[in-house]
Amino acid sequence: MNATDHHRPSFSFELFPPKTPEGSAKLKTVIAELAAVGPEYFSVTYGAGGSTREGTFETVAWLRAQDLETAPHLACIGSNPEEVRGLLDGYRAQGIHRIVALRGDLPSGTGTGSAGAFRYANELVTFIRAEHGAHFHIEVAAYPEYHPQAANPARDLENFKRKVQAGADSAITQYFYNADAYFGFVEAARAQGVEVPIVPGIMPITNYTQLARFSDACGAEIPRWARRRLEGYGDDLEALRAFGHEVVLRLCRNLLDGGAPGLHFYTMNQSGPTLRLWADLGLAA
């Protein structure tokens, strides 16, 4: 099975908006360190129900001021067309040419009646295309291990195909640690006529407690053998991070060797773990 998409490999970094002045200052240093290796773009996340909307817009504006290619996340749940139109117009005015279009989640404790005019990401993709034509390169999400709210794998694949048919140019996956899950998903998508690049999302392993919490929430599987090893390190962070690096490095090599069209790193606003992977993969060359 080969997942080659006949596009130039895409290597990109995800950030989230800082919540404090200290976080903002740290992030600027992190961005400078990451930008030095020449990623294709930085993406910037968008909190549940638009909870980080202002922070996302400010972070994107700062990145653009540094002349860095930027892809804001835009989630449709909890938004109305006027709000989305305003954000898109603002991003276009900043010289943004790439959007990560997501369904998103409502903030905890919010009823489903607050979902807004958009219910699904394919509706947001359709809206962006209607408003701005081909101006934006639209990325959407993909789930190699299937979205935790999907009724079954076939339904999840149908939802993914619907987003692509609405006008998505490419996809970024949820993180995973089983390369076979990725290649199996790509193969199934190709069998459904989906031909856009599907870029693997990569999560460095630096904090097991945090990773386990994230994974349980989003449905990303930590293989049992890796989970047991990570649990066994306890408070030995140096050993845990060395093991985690080898696990993720092996995964990245398998993905690239198997024809993945690039890698999208979930940096968690840290430069060190991602840059170590970058160097050991030889991407700096």
Image: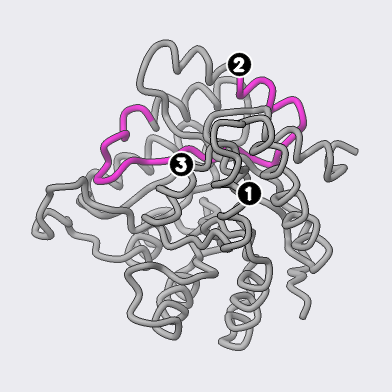
Q: Earlier in the sequence, mark 3 or mark 2?
A: 2
Helix, strand, or loop for circle 1?
Answer: strand
Q: Tell me: 42 left or right of 129.
A: right
Question: Which amino acid does the dot numbered 2 rest on?
Answer: Thr
In the image, which disc is placed on residue 17?
none
**SS type, badge 2:** helix
Please identify, in this view, whether the residue under mark 3 or under mark 2 is nearer the observer: 3
Which residues lie in the magenta part? 30-55
Tell me whether circle 3 and circle 2 mark residues in contact (CB < 8 Å).
Answer: no
Relative vertical location of residue 154 with respect to residue 215 in this rendering, above or below: below
In magenta stretch: residue 42? yes
Of marks 1 and 3, which one's residue comes earlier in the chain?
A: 3
Any mark on residue 29, and which?
2
Question: Does dot 3 land on a helix, a strand or a loop?
Answer: helix
Q: Which residue does the numbered mark 3 point to in the structure image?
A: 209
Q: CA distance from mark 2 to mark 1?
A: 20 Å
Q: Which residue is mark 1?
A: 264
Residue visible at 75% across and 62% down?
Answer: 255
Q: Residue drawn at (56%, 17%), measured in percent from left and top? A: 28
Cα separation, mark 3 vs mark 2, equals 26 Å
x 46%, y 71%: residue: 146
Asked if residue 69 lies left or right of residue 131, the reply is right
Neighbor class of circle 3 (other Cα within 10 Å; few <14, some 14-19, many 20+) is few
